[in-house]
Image (cartoon, helix red, strand yellow):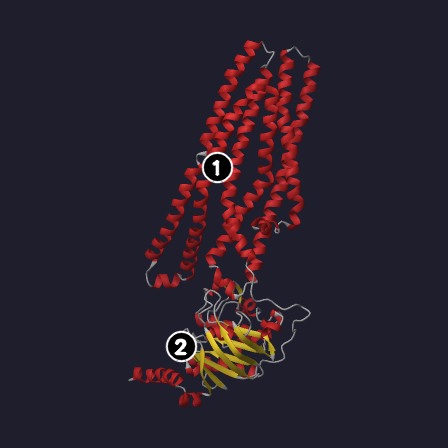
Amino acid sequence: MVIKKLVGSIRQFLPSTIATPLLVSGEVVLECTIPFYIAELVNRIKDGAGVAEIASYGGVLALMAVGSLAFGMIAGMTCATASCGFGKNLRSDMYDRVNAFSFDNIDMFSTGSLVTRMTTDVTNVQNAFMMLTRVAVRAPFMLIFALIMAFRLAGRMAWIFVVVVPILAGTLIMVASRAMPLFRRIFKKYDRMNESIEENISGIRVVKSFVREDYEEEKFGIAAEEVRKDFTKAEKILAWNAPVMQFCLYVVMAFTLSFGSYVVITSMGSEIDVGQISAMLTYSFMVLSSLMMMSMIFVMITLASESAARIAEVLEARSDIVSPDPENAVESVADGSIEFTNVNYAYSGNPDNNVLTGINLKIGSGETVGIIGSTGSGKSSLVQLIPRLYDVTAGEVKVGGVNVKDYDLNVLRSAVAMVLQKNVLFEGTIAENLRWGNPDATMEEMKEAAHLACADEFIDSKEGGYDYRIDHGGANISGGQKQRLCIARALLAKPKIIIFDDSTSAVDTRTDAMIRKGMRQYIPETTKLIIAQRTASVEDADKIIVIDSGRISAVGTHEELLNNSDIYREIYESQNKGGDDDGR
């Protein structure tokens, strides 16, 4: 099953994949035939062959050598094309699969694990693929051909291989059986090490502000040491291959020279001659080098099999959120109205523990709705059901009067813009980041959106303005500046619904109020959902939803909730009285 899944990534490189073993076969046939002709030539020279006969043998040998070289060179090129192309396709297929993941799928894999799978694991599988298409054909073919030629030329002397081949085969089996569990363990530790690196780099400012460099270095050192220990154990086991192979080679050489010389002398060359001894030595090298190559293949496949299984896990992961058939999919969103009917939601990893329970809610198109509640109450989960980042466990969600599951996913998500709690910008210019909201946005439109998001004041102060280059992750601008750029990006999309998931927490209350005023003027027909920790951010909303432990506790205006909701009143009073107490 794993192999079938991976083979699908060969695609346009199938001709090179098929050509490589065919070319290698031709190379091996010629390479194994050369010692036979050399043995014949040696015997003919010993018998007093003339120059013409020697030249004839020499010409044939030269042609076979050139042919073997040509086959080998072309096989090397086709093998490189096939293996590198396969690796490229494999990475692309994994990347495409990850992009198609729902949030539930993403929750299954850590970022560090996905990075390891797309880099180290793909490299291991690519190397194994290269060896399988070339070396795995060359080694057994050469082994069989060389053994046949050895028995044909040397007769009973070739029975030495019956002794040494089982020794090497036994060594290979021992190595594989002991190394495989170590490689399985190594990849899990690789994941943890990469996660440590990612976490440390992304949080480097926190690490430095709390002077935790030594702690992080120690944590990484422990992870790296665990990888080193397992790799050392594996390498110690693999190290048995070379000395055992060398031992068998020297045994064969010693036997061939001593026993061969004895037979030549005692039989006066009638049973075996000098040419056959020289050919036997060559075939000995071929047989044992083939076994050595097979041991390398065995080790590589052992290493790659675990990588292949990990890659297949990603490729086989199927999003539970898919568009309906194109013929049945709704291709337009009428308006920004939203309706929740008896909605329950639980994360796939914990189906018995609802995050949201019994949600019934109607929001009119164009309304401004505040959502407030304690941390972990389910606010973000609620709004993520609207663009189908997650799917409901029970009940239904409608947008524009249509169940969200009936929309083409791209159509639905294009109509719902989200400014997430964790603001993400990409490496590139400010203009390039803003155009994520609308790829065709003009400079005037970008300036208008930036003005409404109160981002123009700092953009104009940057060198190059909208051409100012943002570093990876927005590391060279502040958190508040990131939030305002993300808001401007969402405004440019001019969606039917816009969701702010606590996305003004890093700006001051004055700027927050200006952004909300700008939204009312710029996108009056767009439904605006505002998740906030501050009651000041939702006081002027058409209605406010109070979420408590995954349930709707109350719905109303600011004044109504102050009178009717203990939770809302407590939040409001703690924020406002807290300010007064501090002032005193």
Q: Residue furthest front?
A: 352
Q: Earlier in the sequence, mark 1 or mark 2?
A: 1
Which residue in the protein does label 2 denote?
Answer: 374
Which residue in the protein does label 1 denote?
Answer: 173
Q: Is residue 409 left or right of residue 55?
A: left
From the image, which quarter does the C terminus lie in?
bottom left
Placement of 299 over or under 42, stated as above or below: below
Residue 546's x, y, as percent? 44, 82
Q: Residue at x 64, y 27 (%)?
A: 65
For residue 447, what is the image quadrant? bottom right
Crowd tier of the residue under label 1, counting other residues whose Cα lies within 10 Å: few below 14, some 14–19, many 20 or above: few
Number of numbered discs on residues: 2
Which residue type carries mark 2? Ser
Which residue type carries mark 1? Ile
* Residue 112 appears in the figure: yes
Residue at disc 2, secondary structure = loop
Foreground residue among 447 and 158: 158
Disc ID at residue 526:
none
Placement of 465 over or under 13, stated as above or below: below
Foreground residue among 117 and 309: 309
Q: CA distance from mark 1 to mark 2?
A: 59 Å
Residue 337's x, y, as percent? 57, 81
Residue 421's x, y, as percent? 46, 71
* Residue 471 appears in the figure: no
Q: Is residue 552 left or right of residue 492?
A: left
